[in-house]
Amino acid sequence: MGSNDIPRSIGNRYFREIRGLIEENRSNIWTAFQKEIIPRIHQYRNLTANRLTVNDPYDEIRRITNRLRQQGERVFSIPIVERIVRRFVEDMNNNQKRRFGQRMSRVLGFDPTRNEPWLSSFLETAIQDNVNWIKSIQSEYHDKIETIITQGVRRGSSIRNMASEIAEVGNVEVRRARFIARDQMGSIHGDLTKRRQEESGIKRFRWSTSGDERVRDSHEDLDGEIFEWSKGATNERGETIWPGTDYNCRCTAEPVLEDLLEDD
């Protein structure tokens, strides 16, 4: 059926802002690796067995990686990450609320989104979840970088191989950020849609895919089908799902307004 309800531009901006933090962190690591760590690797390897009584170059490398972790924590500080996340979550809510409110006003004659006592708690939970996911990018990134460098030094890996692995870790984290942005865009939109429709007395929804080649087959099979909000649909793994709640799902829920009108 296709739907344009999910605001892609909000998700794209969210990804770009997360990627900006990753690239800043990545630049700091790469500069330190080239200017500080590589020279110390050479020093470490030039030491003879007789002179290697204290691993000074290796200890300095560990101190540098610890400093880089602290730098990363500043780049991904809670205030910075929370500002990015809060803007994303609030923009997703405002977009979905406006569209739903306009649609329901045409049907009911009033906007049911004017009074939503549940909303504040919902938004804060979504914000905290996203902050934790983005913060985990930074911590896991540095865990991997430290492992590449310290194990590479001890095992005699080539500097070229270490540099290649460091670059790939950065690429992996960018891909992970893209996944988080896409997944949360659909998930938050879907959760808000479910809650608002249920709060408005809408009992059923019609599944609507995004109508492109990226729609998974199991969701394509659900397109146009009507489900009860209380029961949801079932995915290929036998799990109960609603539009947007399956991983990276871009589907949306069209309200079955006939039920509401019949109740009235």
Image: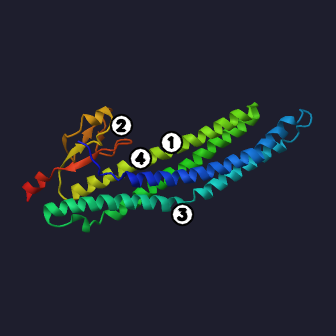
Count neighbours of disc 2 (C-alpha within 10 A) and say few if under 14, some if 14 to 19, many if 20 or more: few
Q: Cβ–Cβ below 8 Å for labels 1 and 2?
A: no
- Mark 1 vs mark 2: which is more N-terminal? 1
- Whole-angstrom CA distance, mark 1 to mark 3, is 23 Å
Query: Which corner quadrant holds the C terminus?
Result: bottom left
Callout 4: SS = helix
- Whole-angstrom CA distance, mark 3 to mark 2, is 35 Å
- Mark 4 vs mark 3: which is more N-terminal? 3
Asked where in the image residue 43 lies, by quadrant, the reply is: top right
Three-letter residue code for mark 3: Pro
| Residue on which disc 1 sits | 175
Callout 2: SS = loop
Asked where in the image residue 263 lies, by quadrant, the reply is: bottom left
Along the viewing direction, whichever of 80 and 118 lies nearer the viewer: 80
| Residue on which disc 4 sits | 182
- Is residue 174 shown left or right of residue 152? left
Three-letter residue code for mark 1: Arg
Q: Position of residue 112 (x, y in %)?
A: 21, 64
Question: Would you say residue 146 is visible in this rendering?
Answer: yes
Q: Position of residue 187 (x, y in %)?
A: 36, 49
Q: Residue at x 63, y 40 (%)?
A: 167
